[in-house]
Each structure stands twice: as C-alpha cells, then as structure tokens.
Image (spheres, grey):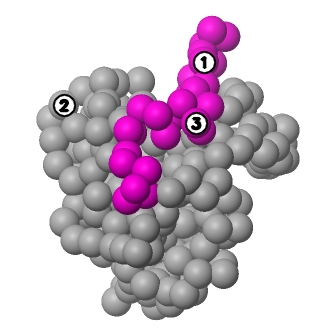
Amino acid sequence: MTEAVTFWDGVYAARPAATRPRPNTRLTEVATPLPPGDALDLGCGDGGDALWLAGQGWRVTAADISAVAVERLTALAGAHGLGDRITAVRHDLRDSFPDGTFDLICAHYLHTPFDLDRAGVLRAAAHALRPGGRLLVVDHGSTAPWSWNQDPDARYPSPREVAAGIALDPAAWTIERADAPRRIATGPGGRTAEVTDHVLLIRRNP
C-alpha cells in the first residue's frame, strides 16, 4: 500500500461516514441545465456529487484513491436507492484512469500532498469526453480554515493557468468558463468562511 493510499484512507477513516453528503455548489450550477448521461467523478470523497448526479438521472462512475471512501459510497448509494446508478471504484490516478467515455467529468479539489501529474490526469479526462461532453475542474483559490493544507505560502494557479497546463488543442476543445467566484462555505462542525473557487469548464467540440 502506498503512502498516498494510507494517508487518504486515514483521512476518511478518522471521521464518521457521511449519511447525506452535500454536492459541490459549482457542480449543481453547471450540471443542472444539462441532460443526464454518463458522468465520471474524479476524487469522489464522501460522494455528495455522485449521489446528486445519480438523483438527477445520471449514470455515475465515482473514483477515489481511498478504499474507505469507495466502500462507504457504495453502501450509501444502496441506502439511497441509487445503487444501480453509481459504480464506485478505487483508482490511484497516478497509475490508472477509469475506463469509458463520458458526457460530464468533474474533478473537484483534486489536490494532494503527494506527487500527482494533475495536468496529465486532466488531459486524460478531456480525452475521455464524448463529443459535446464537458470537463469541470474546480480548484481551491483560497485556504479554508479547516483545510488540511494550511501552508501560508500556498499558491493557487488560475483557471487559465490550469488550462494552459492541460494543453488541449483549441480546435477540439473549447474553454466555456474560467473564473474565480467566491462563496460562503460550511466546514466541519458548521463553521463557515468565505472561500474562492477556481472554476474551469472545458467542452469537447461536437
């Protein structure tokens, strides 16, 4: 078992299993007007995004490095009557990428203290889109008080910098959104704080 797997299993095992995890705000903004199809959730965590998408009629592949997170989401999907719409799988994205093609791929806060070729992962995700499909990348643009990363020198690349790193052919993919909206986030124990999201939305041209 790698150090990264041990770390993320420990992160999830250290907190109670979520019973009704909330979806990410930027996902509901982007996905609400879209017709349901096949979705891939990279770094599914507690499963709030996967459960919300499945509830909207999507068929969801939910991937995480943590077996604890994957097992909990599988159980939660069954408990919510969504077991036939959610397939939770363990993937260390440094070594493997989920099979299939998708209409929506989301990567929310895909940050880790371990080495990860994030640009390579997101490039693979863009290539796994069907024509007309979208890749939604939401990154931290600020440090929340409850974040595991409290490095005061942390730098958060802009959405345009992330897009430049992915280096997609503009003839085949279009940037539909690249901005840095703010919102009030709720953390553990109900604590709230204003945070900035870096939002990048890329569409594979039909």
Q: Does residue 100 appear anywhere in the picture?
A: yes
Give the mark toward the camera: 2 or 3: 3
Instruction: Indicate the position of residue 102 as horizontal and vertical percent values.
Output: 34, 73
Instruction: Indicate the position of residue 53 as horizontal and vertical percent values.
Output: 53, 77
Mark 2 is surrounded, within 10 Å at the Cα level, by few (under 14), some (14 to 19) or many (20 or more) other residues, namely few
Q: Quadrant of residue 44?
A: bottom left
Quarter placement of the C terminus:
bottom left
Is residue 89 in the magenta section?
no
Give the mark toward the camera: 2 or 1: 1
Quarter placement of the N terminus:
top left
Q: Which of disc 1 and disc 2 is earlier in sequence?
A: 2
Mark 1, residue position = 155
Secondary element at tag 2: loop
Q: Mark 1–mark 3 contact, CB under 8 Å?
A: no
Secondary element at tag 3: helix
**Marks 2 and 1, how far apart at CA:** 26 Å
Front one among 88 and 201: 201
The span picked out in magenta is 148-173
Q: Which of disc 3 and disc 2 is earlier in sequence?
A: 2
Mark 3, residue position = 160
The three-letter code of the residue at mark 1 reads Arg
Compared with 133, 15 (above or below) is above
Magenta part mainly helix, strand or loop? loop
Question: Which residue lies at the image location 71% right of the left edge and 44% below the top edge?
Answer: 179
Mark 2, residue position = 2
The three-letter code of the residue at mark 3 reads Arg
**Marks 1 and 3, how far apart at CA:** 14 Å
